[in-house]
Image (cartoon, rainbow, N blue to C red):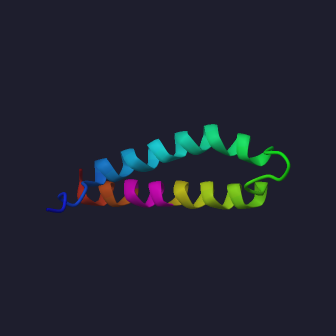
Amino acid sequence: MADAWPTLDEQIAEIDRELRLREVVYPRWLVAVPRPKLTQAAADRQMLRLRAARASLLELKGLRGN
Protein backbone atom coordinates (compact mmCIF):
# COMPACT_ATOMS: atom_id res chain seq x y z
CA MET A 1 0.00 0.00 0.00
CA ALA A 2 1.35 3.41 -0.99
CA ASP A 3 1.78 6.21 1.52
CA ALA A 4 -0.61 9.12 1.34
CA TRP A 5 0.48 12.01 -0.87
CA PRO A 6 2.71 14.30 1.24
CA THR A 7 1.29 17.59 2.46
CA LEU A 8 2.87 20.89 1.44
CA ASP A 9 4.46 21.15 4.88
CA GLU A 10 5.94 17.66 4.50
CA GLN A 11 7.26 18.50 1.04
CA ILE A 12 8.84 21.72 2.30
CA ALA A 13 10.37 19.86 5.26
CA GLU A 14 11.85 17.27 2.89
CA ILE A 15 13.42 19.97 0.73
CA ASP A 16 14.79 21.64 3.86
CA ARG A 17 16.28 18.30 4.96
CA GLU A 18 17.84 17.78 1.54
CA LEU A 19 19.28 21.30 1.46
CA ARG A 20 20.88 20.79 4.89
CA LEU A 21 22.33 17.46 3.78
CA ARG A 22 23.78 18.90 0.60
CA GLU A 23 25.28 21.84 2.49
CA VAL A 24 27.31 19.28 4.44
CA VAL A 25 28.07 16.81 1.66
CA TYR A 26 28.77 19.03 -1.35
CA PRO A 27 31.90 20.70 0.08
CA ARG A 28 33.39 17.22 0.64
CA TRP A 29 32.49 16.15 -2.89
CA LEU A 30 33.99 19.28 -4.43
CA VAL A 31 37.43 18.46 -3.03
CA ALA A 32 37.33 14.68 -3.42
CA VAL A 33 40.65 13.18 -4.47
CA PRO A 34 41.71 12.21 -7.06
CA ARG A 35 38.72 13.75 -8.83
CA PRO A 36 35.79 15.76 -7.48
CA LYS A 37 32.42 14.01 -7.62
CA LEU A 38 30.76 17.29 -8.56
CA THR A 39 31.76 20.61 -10.05
CA GLN A 40 31.02 23.86 -8.24
CA ALA A 41 28.82 24.94 -11.16
CA ALA A 42 26.76 21.74 -10.96
CA ALA A 43 26.43 22.05 -7.18
CA ASP A 44 25.31 25.66 -7.52
CA ARG A 45 22.69 24.73 -10.16
CA GLN A 46 21.31 21.89 -8.06
CA MET A 47 21.08 24.00 -4.91
CA LEU A 48 19.38 26.81 -6.87
CA ARG A 49 16.80 24.36 -8.24
CA LEU A 50 16.01 23.04 -4.76
CA ARG A 51 15.71 26.56 -3.37
CA ALA A 52 13.41 27.50 -6.27
CA ALA A 53 11.25 24.42 -5.62
CA ARG A 54 11.05 25.39 -1.94
CA ALA A 55 10.05 28.95 -2.84
CA SER A 56 7.37 27.63 -5.20
CA LEU A 57 5.93 25.39 -2.50
CA LEU A 58 5.91 28.24 0.01
CA GLU A 59 4.15 30.45 -2.53
CA LEU A 60 1.57 27.73 -3.18
CA LYS A 61 1.08 27.29 0.54
CA GLY A 62 0.46 31.04 0.86
CA LEU A 63 -2.07 31.00 -1.98
CA ARG A 64 -3.92 28.16 -0.29
CA GLY A 65 -3.94 30.06 2.97
CA ASN A 66 -2.18 27.25 4.86
Q: Quadrant of the N terminus?
A: bottom left
* Residue at x-position 29% and y-position 54%: 8
30 is within the stretch colored magenta: no
56 is within the stretch colored magenta: yes
Q: Main secondary structure of the magenta part?
A: helix
Residue at the outermost right position:
34
Q: In the image, 53: left or right of 31?
A: left
* Residue at x-position 62% and y-position 59%: 46
Q: In the image, 19: left or right of 31?
A: left
Looking at the picture, tell me which residue is in the foreground, 45 or 25.
25
Q: Position of residue 43 (x, y in %)?
A: 69, 55
Q: Position of residue 10 (x, y in %)?
A: 30, 48
Residue at the outermost left position:
1
Q: In the image, 31: left or right of 1?
A: right
Residues in magenta, as a range: 53-58
* Residue at x-position 17% and y-position 58%: 4
Q: Position of residue 23 (x, y in %)?
A: 62, 41
Q: In the image, 28: left or right of 6?
A: right
Q: Position of residue 30 (x, y in %)?
A: 77, 47
* Residue at x-position 67% and y-position 45%: 26
Number of on-image labels: 0
Looking at the picture, tell me which residue is in the foreground, 32 or 40.
32
Establish if 12 lies above or below 28.
Answer: below
